[in-house]
C-alpha cells in the first residue's frame, strides 16, 4: 500500500508540473516577413544641373573679287573685246627712248607705266635692223612685227601685272600706224585698227606721244 501511494503521489507531481495548457510556455516565432523592397528610385532632392547650349560661330562668306580689267576706269575702257584708251588721261609717265645711233638694231621705244595706270601699251619701231620694209621714216605703215615686214611692233597688256598677259606676245598684231614725229626728241603716232590674234582690238584712231 505504501508503494502505491508513493507512485500516485509522483504521478500527481508530474502532472502538476506539466499542466494541461498546450500553449503555456511556448514562444511565438519571430516575424520573418518584411515588406518587399521598393523598386522605385528614391526621389532626388538635388535640382538637375543646367545645360548650356552654345550657338555655333557665325560663318562669313566673302564674295570673290570681280575680275575686271585693271585701269578700266575711263582711261582704259573695253566692251566686247574692243579697247579704248584715253591717252591724255594717263597719270603715269610715258617712257620714250630714241633709236641709239650706231646700235646694231636701233629702234624707237614708247610705253606706258602699268604700275600707275594699270595697263601696258607699247610701240617698238625697229629701223635698220629688224624688219626690212621700213627704215624709220615718217608716214603711214602697217604694223608688222616680222623680219620681212616693217619691224613695227605693238604690245598690249590690258591688266598690267594681272593674269591676262601681253596680247601681242606672238608678234602677230595687225593694224596701221602713222608716224607724225619720230626723232631724238620724241614719238608722236596715230594707231588704228589694231587687231590681236585673240580677237581683241584697239579700233582707234589713238594718238600716242611721249
Image: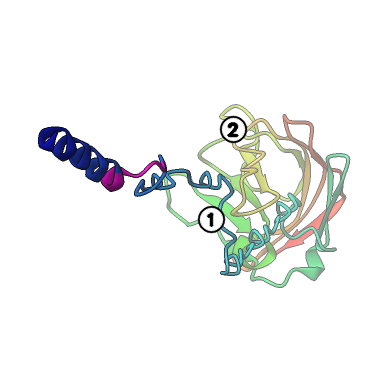
2 left or right, relative to 43: left
Q: Residue furthest front?
A: 1
Residue 150 x %, y %: 65, 36
Mark 2 / mark 1, whichever is N-terminal: 1
Q: Residues within 10 Å of mark 2 (few under 14, many from 20)?
A: some
30 left or right, relative to 158: left
Residue 50's label in the rendered image is none
The residue positioned 53% from the left and 37% from the top of the image is: 130
Q: Residues within 10 Å of mark 1 (few under 14, many from 20)?
A: many
- The quadrant of the rendering that contains the N terminus is top left
Q: Mark 1 points at which residue?
A: 99
Badge 1 element: loop
Residue 91 x %, y %: 71, 72
Q: Residue furthest top?
A: 148
The reply to whether the magenta stretch includes residue 31 is no
User: Closest to the observer: 111 or 57?
Assistant: 57
Q: In this view, does 158 lie above or below 208?
A: above
- Stretch of the chain drawn in magenta: 16-21
The residue positioned 38% from the left and 48% from the top of the image is: 24
Q: In which quarter of the image is residue 71?
A: bottom right
Residue 132's label in the rendered image is 2
Amino acid at each position: 500500500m505504501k508503494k502505491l501511494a508513493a507512485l500516485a503521489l509522483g504521478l500527481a507531481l508530474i502532472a502538476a508540473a506539466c499542466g494541461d495548457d498546450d500553449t503555456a510556455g511556448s514562444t511565438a516565432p519571430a516575424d520573418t516577413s518584411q515588406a518587399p523592397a521598393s523598386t522605385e528610385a528614391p526621389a532626388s532632392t538635388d535640382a538637375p544641373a543646367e545645360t548650356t547650349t552654345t550657338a555655333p560661330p557665325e560663318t562669313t562668306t566673302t564674295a570673290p573679287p570681280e575680275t575686271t580689267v585693271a585701269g578700266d576706269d575711263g582711261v582704259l575702257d573695253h566692251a566686247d573685246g574692243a579697247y579704248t584708251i584715253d591717252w591724255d588721261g594717263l597719270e603715269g609717265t610715258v617712257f620714250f627712248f630714241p633709236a641709239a645711233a650706231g646700235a646694231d638694231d636701233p629702234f624707237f621705244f614708247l610705253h606706258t607705266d602699268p604700275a600707275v595706270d594699270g595697263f601696258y601699251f607699247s610701240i617698238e619701231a625697229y629701223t635698220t635692223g629688224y624688219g626690212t620694209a621700213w627704215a624709220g621714216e615718217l608716214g603711214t605703215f602697217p604694223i608688222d612685227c616680222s623680219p620681212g615686214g616693217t619691224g613695227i611692233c605693238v604690245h598690249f597688256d590690258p591688266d598690267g601685272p594681272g593674269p591676262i598677259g601681253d596680247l601681242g606676245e606672238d608678234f602677230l598684231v595687225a593694224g596701221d600706224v602713222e608716224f607724225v614725229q619720230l626723232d631724238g626728241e620724241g614719238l608722236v603716232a596715230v594707231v588704228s585698227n589694231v587687231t590681236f590674234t585673240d580677237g581683241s582690238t584697239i579700233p582707234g584712231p589713238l594718238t600716242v606721244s611721249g
